[in-house]
Amino acid sequence: MERASWEERRARAFDVFNRARGEGADPERMARWLEHRGALGSFAVDVVMGDVWARPTLALRDQAFLRLSALMANARDEELVAHLGISLDIGVTRTEIEEVLLHCAVYAGFPAAMAASRHVDAVFCKLDGASRVEGRSPAPRKSDEERERDAADVRRTLTGGRSNPDPAADLAAMEAALGGVGTIAYRWAFGEVWSRPELGRRERSLVVITMLASLGQTEELAFHVPAGLNHGLTREEIEEIMVHLCIYAGVPRAVDGMRATRAAFAKLDTRRA
């Protein structure tokens, strides 16, 4: 691990802030504003941006998805408002932000997602100079047969082809293990949310791993870490999620997430040996 001077970390912070905010960014002004909060503000510049955002493993766009996911799942609504603007500057689309909301409903609950959606609407309306967001479409009106078919396809990619390709049999196995929870998870979470084309499955895995780790749901990481690998995330990228969660969910949650992640990797390596 290379060492840096304070000046080098501050320079990294300014560089990543400029890249995130684009034309018109004023990192000096940002730093002065934050440092009115004393040590907390200086850490927000030199640690959050200079030590963490500046790390190269996750692209800025991936980092934006990560931050939105952690903030929505943990109902950090005031911070969410600021990061919605940053995410849009980085290139995350409004549609993609709304897909993160759907995963929040699945993995953190509808109350958290509905609360976050009100702040999303407020930001979009302010940008548009409008009183309400227009042009949204409801979810496709799928039959249970269609939901189960789409769920089976999602589970095929999540498991790397290890799930039962027969939707009825795959659903029956989940219901045998989880009862009615398995029914909802299969038909709604997999069949309606994960299967939507508006966001790629790699990004969906990044969002879900972030939400689970930030909420301390480490048992679920045993499934979703390998699923993330199947969807194109690398081991380094998944571990990097935990590094960023030191900032957005706290070091204890990040430690638990890293331990669960490495346990999942070790299990995969044992299986392949």
Image (tube, rainbow, N blue to C red):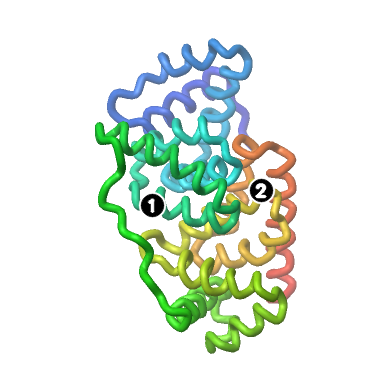
Q: Quadrant of residue 169?
A: bottom right
Whether residue 211 can be seen here: yes
Q: In the rendered image, is residue 57 in sight?
A: no
**What amino acid type is highlighted by mark number 2?**
Leu
Residue drawn at point x = 41 percent, y = 48 percent:
97
What residue lies at 56% left-to-right and 46% top-to-bottom?
Answer: 112
| Drawn side of residue 3 relative to residue 270, left or right | left
Quadrant housing residue 130: top left
- Of 171 and 62, nearer the camera is 171
Determine whether 111 is above or below 53 in the image: below
Of residues 169 and 235, the one nearer the viewer is 169
Q: Earlier in the sequence, mark 1 or mark 2?
A: 1
Q: Quadrant of the N terminus?
A: top right
Please state the horizontal and vertical placement of residue 46, each as a whole percent of the image.
56, 23
Task: Say what secondary structure mark 2 lies in.
Answer: loop
Residue marked by disc 2: 215
Report the Cα–Cα distance between label 1 and label 2. 21 Å
Instruction: Relative to 71, say whether 173 is above or below.
Output: below
Which residue, given by chain and number where applicable, does mark 1 sit on? 96
Give the amino acid at mark 1. Glu
Query: Considering the numbered disc 1 on the image, is that residue within a helix, a strand or a loop?
Result: helix
Q: Quadrant of the C terminus?
A: bottom right
Q: Position of residue 230 (x, y in %)?
A: 54, 69
Instruction: Work out whether 66 lies above or below 172.
Output: above
- Splitting the image into 4 quarters, where does residue 41 fall? top right
Residue at position x 36%, y 31% in the image = 21
